[in-house]
Amino acid sequence: MANLVDTNIVVAKVVDTDPNHELVEEFFREHQMDIMESVYQELRQTFYEKAFSALTKLKKAMSKANKMEFSSEEEEIKAIRELTIQICRETEPKILNFCEYIVNVAEERGLLLLRKRVELLREMNDFIIEQTSKIDRLSGTHRIIQLKKEELESAIDIYDRVRDRFKDDHDALIFSEAVMFSAKTDESFILYTLDRNFARTAREVLEELKEENPEIKLQVVYLPEEIEKEANKTFSPL
């Protein structure tokens, strides 16, 4: 059985400050993690770009905050956080999750203060580069499932049918590739995700596709639910 993963799981594995890092690390110590090429390439190509764009928003927020007065560090941190999110929503809402992520990391490191602007830029630059390097190294430690030309065409056909059901193009593409793989091999597939809404939508669409093609051997699993089920099995009385 192949254990495919959504982008959010790979991010949680790579980024040790991610709130789901320990959960993902523990689960995949005993389960193989297979990464679809679309997930791997998306992370490689966009993580660096989006993370630095989010850092730029944080720098602009600190410039605005520098003209304000604060009665405490807590008030200052809150204002910088809110300004960063506001700037992101107004200028580049598609990377809002990256803005929240960069702000969270900076706050956890005690850098979300005007007097630490120099340290913030240096440490966050290094942090983003470090995370990008971790993503690059995944190809040496995990199976990257690559598409052949005819498989890509099949995935695109599926994508064209289901795109409108998902919140964005990337979610639809991940789902379509997973469906295509499971229909063309004898291997069963599980697609794990940390996005509850994606899991719900994918299951609904999957049921419809399976009615047309019983050869699809895919399950979509919301990882926290799976971990809870396994824990209940472990501790249930005999």
Image: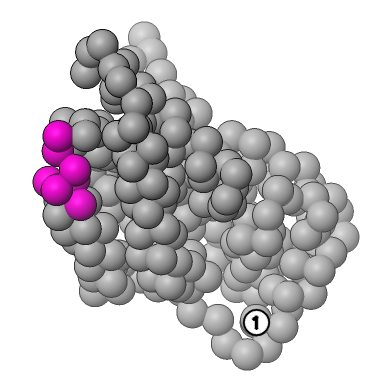
- In the image, taking residue 26 as reference, residue 1 lies left or right, namely right
> At x 87% / y 60%, what residue is drawn?
212
Residue 192: % across, % down: 50, 47
> At x 34% / y 26%, what residue is drawn?
68
- Considering the image in quadrants, where does the C terminus appear? top left
- In the image, taking residue 126 as reference, residue 55 lies left or right, namely right
- In the image, taking residue 227 as reference, residue 215 lies left or right, namely right
Q: Residue furthest bottom?
A: 149
Residue 31: % across, % down: 33, 49
In the rendered image, the vertical position of residue 127 relative to residue 35, given as above or below? above
179 vs 66, nearest the viewer? 66
> At x 51% / y 45%, what residue is drawn?
88
Q: Which residue is mark 1?
A: 151
Q: Main secondary structure of the magenta part?
A: helix
Marks counted in the figure total 1
* Residue 119 is a magenta residue: yes
Q: Residue 101's quadrant in the figure?
A: top left
Circle 1: is it few (<14), some (14-19), or many (20+) Cα within 10 Å? some
Amino acid marked by disc 1: Glu
62 vs 41, nearest the viewer? 62
In the rendered image, the vertical position of residue 58 relative to residue 5, given as above or below? above
In the rendered image, the vertical position of residue 237 relative to residue 197, given as above or below? above
Q: How is the image coloured?
A: one colour
Tell me if I can see residue 8 in this picture: yes
Q: Residue 179's quadrant in the figure?
A: bottom right
- In the image, taking residue 152 as reference, residue 1 lies left or right, namely left
Residue 69: % across, % down: 30, 20
160 vs 61, nearest the viewer? 61
Residue 231: % across, % down: 36, 23
In the rendered image, the vertical position of residue 104 relative to residue 177, given as above or below? above
Residue segment shown in magenta: 115-121
Q: Residue furthest right?
A: 212
